[in-house]
Amino acid sequence: MALKQISSNKCFGGLQKVFEHDSVELNCKMKFAVYLPPKAETGKCPALYWLSGLTCTEQNFISKSGYHQAASEHGLVVIAPDTSPRGCNIKGEDESWDFGTGAGFYVDATEDPWKTNYRMYSYITEELPQLINANFPVDPQRTSIFGHSMGGHGALICALKNPGKYKSVSAFAPICNPVLCPWGKKAFSGYLGTDQSKWKAYDATHLVKSYPGSQLDILIDQGKEDQFLLDGQLLPDNFIAACTEKKIPVVFRLQEGYDHSYYFIATFITDHIRHHAKYLNA
């Protein structure tokens, strides 16, 4: 699989790179960002995947979160893919900010006209890791995942649907119960059709209820002044209740005064990198 390097910038002794490739799953050109810490020059490092939220590309996280210093210190390769296929010329893909371009929701679409390209779940869990493992100095046995908002939803479902694949998972303001919120209902009905029983396969609150319980330590940060929390888009209480019932360890921190933005992410990103490093470097 040919990779084309788009950019490379030195940062905290390592290199922040962006690549482009032809995705088989998504049937289009895709970009992803990779941070290679100084340790990657001398050996294989753990891989930590970041999934971004609605409207984002691979750029938002690498330019706004301030994660590089912690990733450099802990020796983590951090991969940040785009959030959806791009330029597929599907009718309606650019009509709204919360569906189509920039809003893949990390599902494998089953409905026309989306099912040919909108296969972000398989891209994130299969195609991209194979690409990373083949081209970068990572240890495939040491992988974790985290994300924000729609990407927080993505991180949770990837971990819950693949017991043992990820050493740890964390999220900032994740969409925890998409089958019950406006964003989720819109995306799932478009990508997955009207049969709501099929939606549950991509809903963290439902997935955790049947999770077989191999060790998974979940960290969630949520801003208390997050407008999307107040609007009922995120529904973390439902997820926490399901985790408690299943005795799955989850640390949920409601952060006073913080909103949904990258200022919030930047404030607590080092805690999340540390959370993952604890398991990845164990």
Image: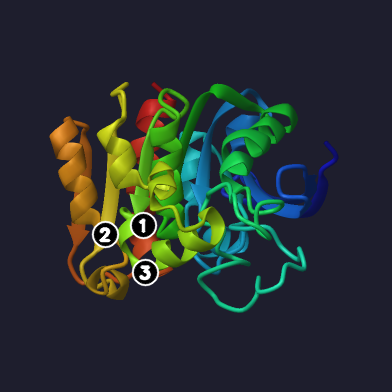
Determine the secondary structure under disc 1.
helix
Residue farthest to the bottom, as pictured: 95
Left or right, 66 with reference to 139: left
- Residue 174 visible here: no
The image shows residue 63, relative to residue 269, as above or below, that is below
Q: Position of residue 13 (x, y in %)?
A: 61, 44
**Where's the N terminus, which quadrant?**
top right
Indicate which disc, 2 or 3, sits on the residue closer to the N terminus: 3
- Residue 153 visible here: yes
Determine the secondary structure under disc 3.
helix
Indicate which disc, 2 or 1, sits on the residue closer to the N terminus: 1
Q: Position of residue 43 (x, y in %)?
A: 63, 23
Badge 1 local density, few (<14 within 10 Å), some, or many (20+)? many
Q: Residue visible at 36% across and 50% down? A: 171
**Where's the C terminus, which quadrant?**
top left
The Cα atoms of the two marked residues, 2 and 3, are separated by 19 Å
Q: Residue visible at 23% across and 73% down? A: 230
Q: On the image, which quarter does residue 35 sit in?
A: top right
In front of the other: 254 or 199: 199
User: Which of the two discs, 2 and 1, sits closer to the camera?
Assistant: 1
Q: Residue visible at 61% across and 63% down? A: 57
Left or right, 135 with reference to 129: right
Q: Position of residue 40 (x, y in %)?
A: 63, 31
The Cα atoms of the two marked residues, 2 and 1, are separated by 16 Å
Q: Which residue is disc 1 drawn over?
A: 178
Q: On the image, which quarter does residue 208 sit in?
A: top left
Q: Which residue is disc 2 drawn over?
A: 222
Q: Position of residue 84 (x, y in %)?
A: 62, 58
Left or right, 268 with reference to 89: left
Determine the secondary structure under disc 2.
strand
Q: Which residue is disc 3 drawn over?
A: 182
